[in-house]
Amino acid sequence: MGTKAYIIITDLDASLLDGSYSYKDAIDALDVIHEEEIPLVLNSSKTLSEMLVIADKWRWKRKPILIGENGATLAFPKLDIEGECWSKYIKSTALLGDYFCVYDPAAYERILSISNKLRINHSFKFEGFSDLSAESLSDLTGLNLQASKNAKNRYATEPILWHSSLEDWQYFKQKISAHGIKAVRGGKFFHLMESGYDKAIGMTSVLSLFKNRYPNVDWKTFAIGDSPNDRLMLEQSNLALVIPNAEKGMMALRRPDYYSAKFYASKGWNSSVLEILNLSLTQI
């Protein structure tokens, strides 16, 4: 096996991003990641449209790889820092901005069709993004109107607010899982998605592509997150950093060897990533 190298895979909201959806407090660590040419992957429940806004404003030469909608969508820069095209290694579904994107174009309609039939047949009460106008979503989330439109531009998952009982929720999960759809807890919303995807699978897919493209490198993963939908990714990565969540506290992992940030969101991300880069990545 060749030289060992790390890929950093990070959650966005309340991890790399602060409450204002900014990564300004993580600039120092991001500068080091860029200088060291460490591949960075943004792994989020956000849509590709939302993540492309971040990528378009990226101040560094190496654009991040994007994993959207909890692992169900992938996006790779048309040209990376070596000037070589990722399209040789992936079969893209669409070209959005400067990214080749990979997703199942029929997934979202399948999820809406099945969940809506269950809602009608069993009188479940919930609201999904597809039910909400961009204006209503803005009021609910605090996003501006354009950001809400980007959040509604979905390919593979449907976030919902559940308004029925806990007993109904358990029954709904049982019924929808029989159709191959699972419900993943995010922050404010539950995310309905097909069972073959999650953030850990998204991470594994990207890792596999790096191993295929750079077969002489021994690639390792360094994952960062704060919420239950990050857990599998954090537990399956080689290195893991948990960011404390201001509302839910510090998530515990089922592994003994992980790092815990001392501060919330991008401030904790910055200080801990700098420390881990100094302690771990320089010793490989």
Image (cartoon, rainbow, N blue to C red):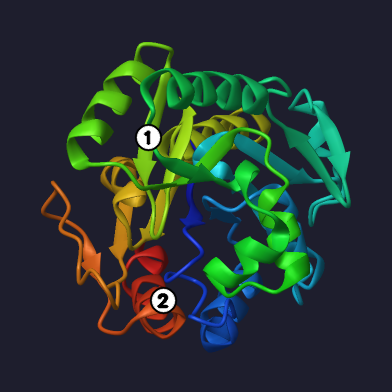
Residue shown at 59% from the left, 20% from the top: 113
Residue marked by disc 1: 183
Residue marked by disc 2: 269
Residue shown at 63% from the left, 63% from the top: 136
Residue 21 position in % (x across, y down): 58, 76
Q: Left or right: where does residue 176 sit relative to residue 261?
A: right
Q: Indicate whether 113 appears above or below 94.
A: above
Residue type (three-letter) at the residue carrying disc 1: Ala
Q: Left or right: where does residue 240 sit relative to residue 138?
A: left
| Residue situated in front as seen by the camera: 41 or 88 | 41
Q: Indicate whether 113 appears above or below 254.
A: above
Farthest residue, direction top: 178
Residue type (three-letter) at the residue carrying disc 2: Trp
Give the quadrant of residue 22: bottom right
Q: Secondary structure at mark 2?
A: helix
Give the quadrant of residue 184: top left
